[in-house]
Image (tube, helix red, strand yellow):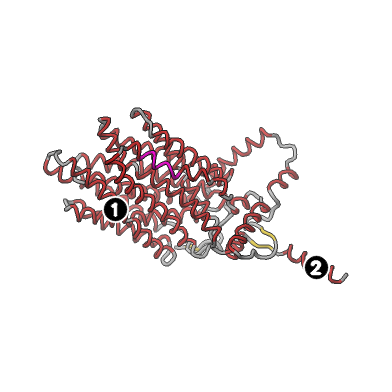
Amino acid sequence: MLDHKMVKQEEEERLLCKYTLDEALAAVGFGKFQGLVLVYAGLGSFAEAMEMMILSFVGPAVKSEWGLSSSQESLLTSVVFAGMLFGAYSWGLISDNYGRRKGILGSTLLTCGAGSLSTFCPNYISLITLRCLVGIGLGGGPVFSSWFLEFVPASHRGTWMVVYSTSWTFGTIFEATLAWIVMPRLSWRWLLAFSSLPSIVLLLFYRLAPESPRYLCTKGRFTDAHRILEKIALLNQAKLPGGILVSDSTTGLDEESSSLSHQPLLSLARKRVSSFKSAFSSFFMLFSSRLIKTTLLLWVLYFGNSFLYYGIILLTSELSGRQDECRSATSSLENHQDENLYIDIFITSLAELPGIILSAITVDRFGRKRSMIFMFVAACIFLLPLVSHQSAVLRTSFLFGARMCAIGTFTIACIYCPELYPTPVRTTGSGVASAAGRIGGMICPLVAVGLVTGCHVEAGIIVFEVVAAISAICLLFFPYETKGCELSDSVGPFDPKHNNLVG
């Protein structure tokens, strides 16, 4: 009888113990489960990188085959960014209000479908329409990164996010290699077909992707979140803390039981209206007194990052022989330019590997802000010599260094942004910031293609210098450094336990 009372007392004490999601993730550590999540999310980033790198090859090839103007070639790139602008906002809202998995599924379906159909386009109008739809699908990229981020323990989170970012780099290198092999032998249509294969693989393995336990906790679904944590612990061969799982922001019941007890007669129509309002409320939270400064600064940062990164990629293709052509006033170098195009893009794509390594070394050692400021300044230094005419070797070397720094800032920004936002608005905030970046991506073709094609190389380079400088300066005004801090689940007042205030 005494033993029974002791067991019952121990059970009651266990139930009184509570632990948060961050404590659970710290206990189970980074193991096989997160490794599988990393592979799936990384494949999403790999697929996005391939679809973006296509723009460096398809534009010139379609222009030559269909006799397009330079503005039509630029539009082929800009419509993809326009689609990403809309998609980043839309998939962010969907994943914050209906789950990360739904955001991943919707964006992947659209990317896969429109990307595959692009192969059979009979004319220019159908091609830009489908590539715009591909852009909308690619706008789901921030959902993949936020989804993976929410499985990673706070310790060394920056390093693991940099590891995740390598998938983008390998995607760009793989696409450059694929284009080098496919384009001279087949055509741009085959390149589009091969490039859609990673999205097909994502769909095949979608059922294995778990929902984010952090998202489930914010929705009050602690039972579902605990079930996933048990799977993580089992696969990682670790143990969860004793007690019950609670959220940092609430200790409520499961979403389902809460709905039954408080709103048993809520009609289906009212539920839909409530979900619709909830979706837009997450957007307006970005402009609350706590978040508005962060939101606006992130827009500037992402705009500058996208403008610089995609601009350097486009500059590489446009500068391959372009300066010599402008100076010699002849177009007899066309075959030489085609050869240089594949070589230069492949070599500069390799620059992303040291860029990723540099990010991994600095992000958790010096912090997010200092690392990005250093890389923006370095990018300016590498781009500056391109104002004047350079030999092919020096030109490629400077573009190599600039792209190394550009991918470094881009990588750390994609870590920093979701860390700054609390869970209820994390993918919405990241998606809207990414959308602001897509505006930079839409504008940069007009600079990289328009100015360089018009033999105004100096003006184009100066524009990139100014954008990089403004981006570096805006980083000085960010209020928080997130190195080593836990993710926040509440949109409430500033909590020094979760963030470090940097003056």
For the stretch drawn in magenta, the main secondary structure is helix
* Label 1 environment density (alpha carbons within 10 Å; few <14, some 14–19, many ≥20): many
In the rendered image, residue 192 lying in the magenta stretch gets the answer yes
Q: Which mark is residue 7?
A: 2
Q: Which mark is residue 335?
A: none
According to the image, label 1 marks what residue? Answer: 348
Residue 419 place in picture, x, y as percent: 50, 56
Residue 442 placement, left or right of 490: left
Task: Identify the residue at image location x=63%, y=38%.
Answer: 274
Q: Dot 1: what SS?
A: helix
Compared with residue 125, is residue 194 higher up or lower down, i.e. above or below?
A: below
Q: Amino acid at mark 2?
A: Val
Task: Identify the residue at image location x=40%, y=49%.
Answer: 302
Q: Residue furthest front?
A: 185
* Label 2 environment density (alpha carbons within 10 Å; few <14, some 14–19, many ≥20): few
Q: Residue furthest left?
A: 328
Residue 381 placement, left or right of 426: left
In the rendered image, residue 105 lying in the magenta stretch gets the answer no
Tell me the CA gap for discs 1 and 2. 65 Å
Residue 500 place in picture, x, y as percent: 50, 63
Q: Please tell me which of labels 1 and 2 falls first in the chain.
A: 2
Q: Nearer the viewer, residue 1 or 179?
A: 179
Q: Nearer the viewer, residue 356 or 268?
A: 356
Q: Amino acid at mark 1?
A: Thr
Residue 285 place in picture, x, y as percent: 54, 46
Task: Identify the residue at image location x=68%, y=56%.
Answer: 251
Q: Residue furthest bottom?
A: 2
Q: Which residues are magenta?
A: 191-198
Q: Nearer the viewer, residue 398 or 65?
A: 65
Residue 377 place in picture, x, y as percent: 31, 58
Task: Identify the residue at image location x=24%, y=46%.
Answer: 341
Q: Dot 2: what SS?
A: helix
